[in-house]
Every structure is written in C-alpha cells, then in structure tokens.
Amino acid sequence: MIAMLLAGGQGSRLGVLTESVAKPAVSFGGKYRIIDFPLSNCINSGIDTVGVLTQYQPLRLNTHIGIGIPWDLDRNYGGVTVLPPYEKSTSSEWYTGTANAIYQNLVYMEQYSPKYVLILSGDHIYKMDYEVMLDFHKENKADVTIATMPVPLEEAKRFGIVIADEDKKINDFEEKPENPRSNLASMGIYIFNFKVLKQALIAMKDQSNCDFGKHIIPYCHGKGKRLFAYEYNGYWKDVGTLGSYWEANMELIDLIPEFNLYEEYWKIYTKCDIIEPQYLAPEAVVERSIIGEGAEIYGEVYNCVIGAGVTIGRGTIVRDSIIMKGATIGNNVTIDRAIIAEHCVISDNVTMGVGEEVPNKYNESIYGFGLVVVGEESHIPAYISVGKNTAISGFTTRDDYPDGVLPSGEVIIKAGDAE
C-alpha cells in the first residue's frame, strides 16, 4: 500500500495564519507542524512510500519535508516525494479538487504497481494505525474503505455521512446532508484497490473540481463496488478554524492530555533545528505550559504553548495563548487568549485581549472565539492596546492605531499583505 497525502490547501478559515504558509505547515504544539501527524502515522503503520501533493504556498512545506529524514522516509525506492502541479505536453493546470490532484499523479502511483492506495488529508491531528484499517479492508473484500467516526447527530450536517448496515457495508453516502440519516462521518481517509481508484479517476476526469466526497465515492457506489465503513474511535481533530486550532493546542497542556504527544510506542516525528535548551530566568513563572527549545522566559506564562526560540520579556504576563517559533514579546506586555504566528515582534507595554467581546467586522466567521490573531512576521509598536476578536498582519506603526487602540472586532491588514 502506498499513501497519497493531500497537503495543497490554503486553510482560509485560519485567516492571517495561512497568508504565507499552507495549512499543513502551520506550527502545532510548540515544535511540530500539522503535516507531521499523518506522516508519522504512515511510518508508524509501516507505509514507506508517500506522495505529498502540494500547491498553495509550498515553500515552507517543501523545506520541512526535505528528503523525509525525520520520518525515516529517505529511501532509495519509495520514501517521500513532494508532488506539485506541473506542466504537461497537452495542458497545464492547477489541482482543482482532491480527486483531480490524485488523477494528475496517476503516473507516480503506477510506477509502484500498488495493490492498495491510501488517501489522506494533511491537516488533521490524530494517531491512526492504517495497517489495522487495511486488515479490515481485506477481511471484507472491499473495493473502497472509508474511515469514519461517530459525531453528534446535530453536527452531522457538516460532514460527508455514510449509511452502513451492521456489517459496516455502506448502502448510501450523503455529502453534508440537511437531514442526516446517520451519525457516521467520513474522516476524508480512504483505502482504494488501485484498479478501482484508477478506473474511477479516469471516468470522472472531466468533472470540474473533481472531489472524492462529491464524485469518486458516489461513482464507485453507483457502479456496485463494495464500500465499507471503518469505524475509528480515537482522538481526531480537524484544526480548520482558529477556535479548533487554539482548542487542540490547549488540550495538549491538560494534566492528563486527551491527545498524548509522549507515547513511546507511537512517536510523532518532526524536523528539529539544532538549538540550545530553553532558559527560565530566576524571576520567571511558568505554569501548565509547553515551552519550546531555545525559548527565553523572563516573565510569567500560564496555560500556554510556546514555540522554539521565543523570547518573553520581563514584567510580561502571557495567558491561554499560542506563541509560535521565533516570536519576540517585549517587556511589561500583557497577552490574554492570543495566537501569535512565527517571527512576530510585540513591543514593550502592549496589552492584548482586553475589553468587550464583539463580532469581528471584517470576517465574523473566521475571527471569533474571543481571540487576538497576529500573522507571521508582524510588528506591533509599543504602548498599544488590542481588543478581542481582532486580527493584525504586517508591519504596523503607531499611526495604524487611533488613540493607541485597536478596538474589539477590528482588523489591521497592511497593504502588500494577502487579504
């Protein structure tokens, strides 16, 4: 079995966090990136041939994956291969849907003559033994197996839903139904017999934005193929919104975390920079937090995930926040419930996360949850006060903040930055 890992998505619901980086390359848990989880699942499951399909802002992802050394995927045969869209003699096109991306890489898959192909998303946080799922696929003589998990019925309309009998044979499949007939949600993880997958991709190749949930699965079902639902009951999180991303990070620092990063038998691997250990100054206070390597803490940190190489100044108090790699937080700063992306500079005497919680005027559906979100390499000048449900991106100056305040629900995205 080979794996095809879809990692080309922008992740627009993460707002300014994904302006210059693909969602699978966003930091998670202080030292990891989101794509580390499916890649680690592959090698822990004995899968040593993985194609990673990239498209949106791929540079960070390509650099992170490299030749696959951290995941033991640097192989002469197989290993990890980054697969961006490319120009062909007859056409040149971007990946226009999940299935279209796989279709454009049929030649890559065919060179390994696989019996089975595992399709994965690069933007979920979970641990799964794909070998157990493959055993289930073989036992049922399935053509297609869909990994599913039970969700509350009232949330089922947000997912692709499968209707299966007691033997887990799928009788019907509905994409985001208004009135769901089942609570078994598709996780976007599929095992196909390669012959079945190839036939379906070729048959549906002219569909616009060809997608597994909308086109390939219904096609296979309509052709009478054997479809089965593999039920998964472990921890699985789609960190597609700022709220779920913040929540998943905060769950890591529970006294008994629901998702354990430290299990000896199922390690999560990542590319590590060789840097010095973290430093806690004599006056520093740290409670219930993850502190990355090379971080220097001179202030107080409570319930936080702090990335590698972060500096937190004297007299500063940070609570319930995610501070990513390389950020510098000045002296006498107060930060409550914020997500601060990589290599930001927060100057002295800034206060973040104050005032009433009002809806965001720019995009209420993205910037909510009472959070302050600061995009990569942004700069916030000294003596500024920032409210809740706010977003800042770019090099901002005192002139960008009338009366030194960014009120709750407001956004500053400087010209030259993606919106």
Image (cartoon, grey):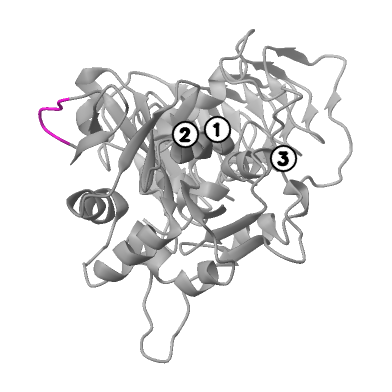
Mark 3 Cα within 10 Å, few/some/many (few <14, many 20+)?
some
Kindly indicate whether the residue at mark 1 contacts the one at mark 2 (C-beta within 8 angstroms).
yes
Q: Which residues are magenta?
A: 177-181
* Residue that lies at the very extreme toward the top in this rendered image: 255
Determine contact: label 2, label 3, CB under 8 Å. no
Q: Position of residue 363 (x, y in %)?
A: 27, 41
Which quadrant, please, contains the C terminus? bottom left
Whole-Å distance between the Cαs marked 2 and 3? 26 Å
- In space, the residues marked 3 and 1 are separated at their CA atoms by 21 Å
What is the C-alpha distance between the residues marked 2 and 1? 6 Å
* Snapshot quadrant of residue 264: top right
- Dot 3 corresponds to which residue? 269
- Relative to 294, is 113 above or below? below
Q: Main secondary structure of the magenta part?
A: loop
Element type at mark 2: helix
Between marks 3 and 1 in the image, the one whose residue lies nearer the viewer: 1
Q: Nearer the viewer, residue 287 or 245?
A: 245
Sequence-first disc among 2 and 3: 2
Q: Which residue is mark 1?
A: 132
**Which kind of residue does numbered mark 3 sit on?**
Tyr
Q: Is residue 383 visible?
A: no
